[in-house]
Amino acid sequence: MSRKVKNLWRILVPMLVICAMLAIPALADDGDGAVSGMYGTFWALVPPIVAIVLALITKEAYSSLFIGVLVGALFSCQFAPVATLDTIVNDGLITAIADNAGIFLFLVILGAIVALVNASGGSAAFGRWAEKNIKSRVGAMIATFVLGVLIFIDDYFNCLTVGSVMRPVTDGHKISRVKLAYLIDATAAPVCMIAPVSSWAAAVSGVAADLDTGISGIQLFVQAIPYNFYSLLTFVFIIGLAVMKFDYGPMKLHEMNAQLNGDLGGLDKTEEETSNPRGKVIDLVLPVVILIIFCVIGMIYVGGFWDGNAGDFIAAFGDTDAFVALPWGSLIVLVLTIIYVVARRLMSFKDAMACIPKGFIAMVPPITILTLAVSLKSMTSALGAAEFVRDMMFGAAQGLYSMLPAIIFVVACILAFASGTSWGTFGILIPIVIAVFEPGTTLLTIGISACLAGAVCGDHCSPISDTTIMASAGAQCDHINHVSTQLPYAITVAAVSFVSFIIAGFVQNWIICLIIGAVLTVATLFGIKAVTAKKDA
């Protein structure tokens, strides 16, 4: 048995024993329900905590997530072996695959499109163009950030598209894949959370639509944008980090390894070997452009733009289903891309067809991780995590009223980190926030912003987050390496955001608070740079 496996068992066995021993009194409280003693308590958060801790310690995602699912199923079924297995298979894995079939299909189709673009030489040609026109590492990072901001329709689409387009650029400037993954992840969810026309805006407005706010859901979302400190200050952080040309924490080691040894830490070692030397930049740009166009068309079509919401673009986005719309648009683009590369004589039809299974194989790791992560979320929901957080929030509301936005931000961070879902987090917390604050007040707007900002922050920090998984897939890097390198950066912005929400609870002026937050972010970067430089001296 290898040392790594032995270390895993040394961690796992005591953890499971402790969980089992502590669970006995909880289960003994009431024998009537399957989760009587644990439901709606801190125990609901234990399975994801187990998975996250194991993932960060072992640097291995698959077994860590599965163990988290196993612990959740054991808690849910009172440690009954047959019922536990049935819960894992039926309520966990099969349900996860069924509920996310659309996004799995989108991943496979997009993987095939990327394989076609790579094989046609489009990616290599874009890399050569970028080498001539993007002269520095700073320019490559800023270009990645700008492209991420421009693709604000959907976070999954953002992660995979930006990753596919910018990998040749960042590779050419010896930017590590984990740094690329951070740039993708730190742009995708935040820009969707402040874009009124996005799948995230539709989700937020849908949650708030039937609640007593005095305004429509989309109006509430727009009003909350200026106070979404985590999303906005993350952009300040990215630009500051790029311009100041330094890194810290685990990211620094990966960046030094990339620059000094040329080891980017990617998973696609043979990509450039199979590219066509006759490829041109247009062979990458054209598929990406038509992919954006058809995915947008797909989203408004599925949302009823030509049917129930005739002519109403915003309403169509509010009623769309990205899990249907993205496969709808990407399938059309896949067919058009095959026709295009064959007509351009960049490859034969047989070679083009061979790219489809290659694309599927490239997406197997994120699909597997996403399946396990969604299964873990199901276990957490079955144990009543939402009820536990709801009770915490109402308890906090009895205390310092003006401090409540900062408390909401922290609670949203914790819930999103443990559950791995931004949408689930604000779906739980928005009704609570609206019930706590008076309708039409500035403090309600700040509270909603704190909820949304915390959801994005916790999502960034969590190894079981779907957006984090998509960012790893887009950058083609190891998922746990991405999480461990991103964590210090996300926590830094979270700390500044927490202070900003404290100030906002009392000042209630977004201009003043945002300026203070931006100054604090830049000052924090200067401080961290000075400390790291002193350590290196």
Image (cartoon, rainbow, N blue to C red):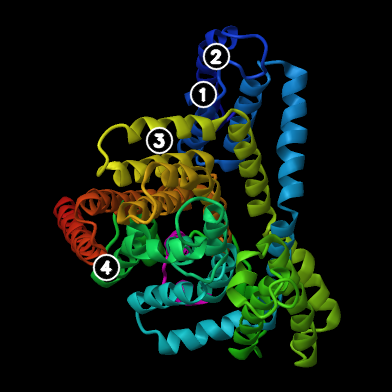
Q: Residues within 10 Å of mark 2 (few under 14, many from 20)?
A: some
Label 3 packing within 10 angstroms: few (<14), some (14-19), many (20+): many
Q: Nearer the viewer, mark 3 or mark 4?
A: 3
The nearer-to-camera label among 1 and 4 is 1
- Residue receiving disc 2: 23
| Residue nearest the observer in this picture, 80 or 308 | 308
Q: Of tags 4 and 2, which is closer to the observer?
A: 2
The residue beneath circle 4 is 240
Q: Are marks 2 and 1 in contact (CB under 8 Å)?
A: yes
Q: Amino acid at mark 1?
A: Trp
Q: Secondary structure at mark 1?
A: helix
Marks 1 and 3, how far apart at CA: 17 Å
Disc 4 on helix, strand or loop? helix
Whichever of labels 3 and 2 marks the residue nearer the N terminus, that label is 2
Label 4 – label 2 distance at C-alpha: 47 Å
Q: Nearer the viewer, residue 152 or 138?
A: 152
Nearer the camera: disc 1 or disc 3 = 3
Where in the figure is residue 17, as x and y percent of width and height?
54, 14
The residue that mark 1 highlights is 43
The residues colored magenta run: 168-185
Label count reads: 4
